[in-house]
Image (cartoon, rainbow, N blue to C red):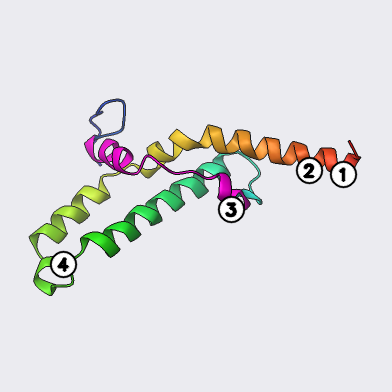
Amino acid sequence: MNTLKYNGWTNYETWLCNMWFDNFDFTDMMDMFDQCEDNCDVLDIIENYIKEHVEEYVETYLQPNDYRSSHGFMHDMLNAAISEIDWRDIAEHYVDDVVDELELIRDDAKSELMGV
């Protein structure tokens, strides 16, 4: 992986991916984090979710059905660029907000159990 920083991100590929996909909102998906015991668990889930989302996007929308286009030079270049993305770096951009939201949800649940 390229270790040169770009605009505060791990590298150009990570920065570019974040620029195009900087709209993740996990508030409607908080149940994904139910089994998380700490911030690292949350970070792992966010990282995997973003990686899968971007890879699915690339597969669905950017890969033409033409065999020559989807298995040639451009395909290899796109895969090379994607392999440089630091998914963890992008996930770290979201983890604090998700952890804060989780704490609110858990505090509300405790309050309900205590009858407050």
Query: Residue 7, percent across and down?
Result: 27, 26
For the residue marked with disc 3, what is the amino acid? Met
SS of the residue at dot 2? helix
**Residue 37, above or below 64:** above
Give the Cα distance between marks 2 and 3.
Answer: 17 Å
For the residue marked with disc 2, what is the amino acid? Ala
Residue under label 1: 113
Residue contact between numbered discs 2 and 1, judged by CB atoms under 8 Å: yes
Residue under label 3: 32
For the residue marked with disc 4, what is the amino acid? Ser
Residue 70 tag number = 4
Q: Quadrant of residue 56?
A: bottom left
Give the Cα distance between marks 2 and 4.
Answer: 49 Å
Give the Cα distance between marks 4 and 1.
Answer: 55 Å
Residue under label 2: 109
**Residue 84, above or below 95:** below
Residue 90 tag number = none
- First in sequence: mark 3 vs mark 1: 3
SS of the residue at dot 1? helix
The residue that appears at 38% across and 51% down in the rendered structure is 51
The residue carrying pointer 3 sits among few (fewer than 14), some (14 to 19) or many (20 or more) residues within 10 Å by Cα, namely few
The residue carrying pointer 1 sits among few (fewer than 14), some (14 to 19) or many (20 or more) residues within 10 Å by Cα, namely few
